[in-house]
Image (cartoon, rainbow, N blue to C red):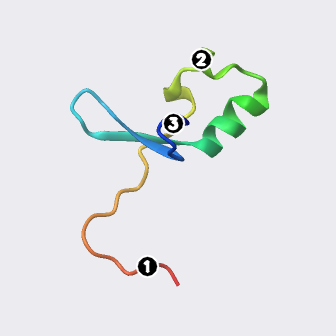
Amino acid sequence: MATRRVDAALLTDSSALLCGIITDKDVATRVIAEGIKPEERVMCKVMTKNPPKRCGNFEPAQ
């Protein structure tokens, strides 16, 4: 994520369906804050699973 300069990544399963999202906050609070090396943690243990999906046009929150 740092290499690509992004704050979040959408994760898909083998069928290319959305199965999770991982953010820089997830890494900071669920990995680094616990003293775990990022390369030693499996992302499926850190990601937010089955995030809510929204399709089509929608009004922004006020």
* Point 21% across, 31% down: residue: 15
Q: Which secondary structure, mark 1?
A: loop
Of badges 2 and 1, nearer the viewer stands: 2
> Where in the figure is residue 13, as x and y percent of width and height?
30, 31
Q: Earlier in the sequence, mark 2 or mark 1?
A: 2
* Point 27% across, 75% down: residue: 57
Q: Quadrant of residue 40?
A: top right
Q: Which mark is residue 1?
A: 3
Q: Earlier in the sequence, mark 3 or mark 2?
A: 3
Q: Is residue 35 above or below residue 1?
A: above
> Where in the figure is residue 29, as x and y percent of width and height?
71, 39
Of badges 3 and 2, nearer the viewer stands: 3
Q: Which mark is residue 60?
A: 1
Q: Residue furthest top?
A: 40
Q: Which secondary structure, mark 3?
A: loop
Of badges 1 and 3, nearer the viewer stands: 3
* Point 43% across, 79% down: residue: 60
Q: Earlier in the sequence, mark 1 or mark 3?
A: 3
The amino acid type, in three-letter code, at marker 3 is Met
Q: Which secondary structure, mark 2?
A: helix
The residue labelled by disc 2 is 39
Q: Quadrant of residue 28?
A: top right
* Point 60% across, 42% down: residue: 24
